[in-house]
Amino acid sequence: MTSTAGVVVVGGGQAAFSVVSTLRASGYDAPVTVFAAEPHLPYQRPPLSKAAHTEPDGLRVELVPESFYRERNIDLRLGDHVVALDTAAATVVSRTGARVPYAHLVLATGARNRPLPVPGAELDGVHALRSVDDALTIGRALTTARDVVVVGGGFIGLELARVALTRGARVTVVELADRLLSRAVSRELELPLRERHEHAGVRVLTGTGVRALEGPGRVERVVTDREVLPADLVVYGIGAIPRDDLAREAGLAVDDGVVVDEQLRSVTDSRISAVGDCARHPHPNVEGLVRLESVQNAIDQGTLVGRRIAGSPASYESLPWFWSDQGDLKLQIAGLRSPSDEVRLVPGDSPERLAGYAFRDGLLVAVETLNWPAEHLAARRLLERRTPILAGDLAGPTLGALARARRAAEVRA
């Protein structure tokens, strides 16, 4: 057992990396130990679905080289994961039997794929995407696949659908909800986004359930409640479940994620924090608690916890933002929209650009854009500053133009 208690981080993803890199950058000099279940160095996940392919030496997605951890005296334990938390003794127990004490414990355990609950889900040729190894497996399968069925019309499903299309496959997306991206994007923006996918060659079936996957050992057909689809490759992405089992078994408060306060400390044990996809937390943009799955959230939460442990506490108030590259479509979202918000769809200065402005009680709370990065950045700046934008303010100008006009007025003043 390590004799001196420091920080133990459970998880080896973007949030975990953000915690440990911030700790050392902030001058924290006590022991830092990271348990990463995968054998790979911590890596970026977004490229996995946007460029699923295979290369001779694999996908180069590591966040930093191994030397980064060695030079900063970070004990990175790859291929080992924590199997139990002893909160009374402030100790973690790993799969290999290691017992490591902690002064602070950070849960950065992420999420796992929601399983596909239909007969035949275990057939060869059926894959979910979560890890770099999954991406390489799917990439190899795409070299020969001709009929690809994507189950789930969310970010990952649509990104993979366009990757498969560029590899020459016939692609069908099957979504149980009545529209694509039903949890993430407004109905107003979803329609033109869907039309562009269909124009590119992706067949989209919404309001359609999958009943079974069939084949003699390997998938050959997808049986839906509308028709039977040929398939030699099935990829599914139907949501994620937070990895909060360790916290639950240790007696911490859990509710679709580890419940934490505004500084991301467990509401049960202040020596324990949770960050990233596994954390359920308060946020000034929403009522109640929220769990966010995004790179921005993982980075910002890890940074906040690292700084807090190093002596600079703060509340988590970062503006949520997201992006998804789906073939030639760049979808970007700033802020958090609720289903009851009023959304105004506005075309940009070229046919491929669109923006959806979401208003709540007359104030702008979120912006969705298609192929309009400048408007997305303007939205982020204004929303981060909590600049009040009324619906009437956008009767003509874009957010970019509005921001420039306000800056000019400030200079003149």
Image (cartoon, rainbow, N blue to C red):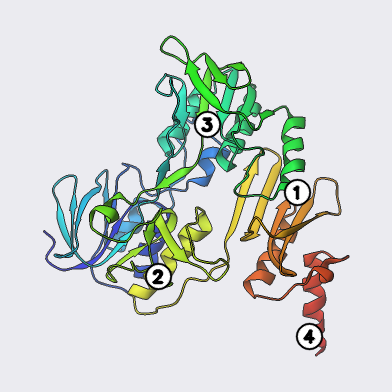
Query: For the residue labelled by badge 4, is the local secondary structure a helix, a strand or a loop?
Result: helix
Q: Sequence-wise, which precedes: disc 4 or disc 1? A: 1
Q: CA distance from mark 4 to mark 1?
A: 37 Å
- Name the image quarter holding residue 380: bottom right
Query: For the residue labelled by badge 3, is the local secondary structure a helix, a strand or a loop?
Result: loop
Looking at the image, which residue is at 20% across and 52% down? 84
Could you classify mark 2 by the number of other residues whose Cα lies within 10 Å: few (under 14), some (14-19), or many (20 or more)? many
Query: For the residue labelled by badge 1, is the local secondary structure a helix, a strand or a loop?
Result: helix
Residue 403 vs residue 392, the one in the foreground: 392
- Residue 53 shows which numbered tag? 3
Could you classify mark 3 by the number of other residues whose Cα lies within 10 Å: few (under 14), some (14-19), or many (20 or more)? many
**Residue highlighted by disc 4:** 411
Residue 309 vs residue 193, the one in the foreground: 193
Q: Position of residue 37 (x, y in %)?
A: 30, 45
Establish if 230 lies above or below 177. Answer: above
Looking at the image, which residue is at 33% across and 68% down? 267
Query: Is the N terminus in the top left, top right, bottom left or bottom right quadrant?
Result: bottom left
**Residue highlighted by disc 1:** 188
Q: Position of residue 299 (x, y in %)?
A: 47, 61
Q: Sequence-wise, which precedes: disc 4 or disc 3? A: 3
Which residue is most to the bottom?
413
Establish if 289 lies above or below 38. Answer: below
Q: Sequence-wise, which precedes: disc 2 or disc 3? A: 3
Query: For the residue labelled by badge 2, is the local secondary structure a helix, a strand or a loop?
Result: loop
- Residue 261 shows which numbered tag? 2
Q: CA distance from mark 4 to mark 3?
A: 50 Å
Mark 2 or mark 3: which is in front? 2
Q: Give, as a three-letter code, the residue at label 3.
A: His
Q: CA distance from mark 2 to mark 3?
A: 40 Å
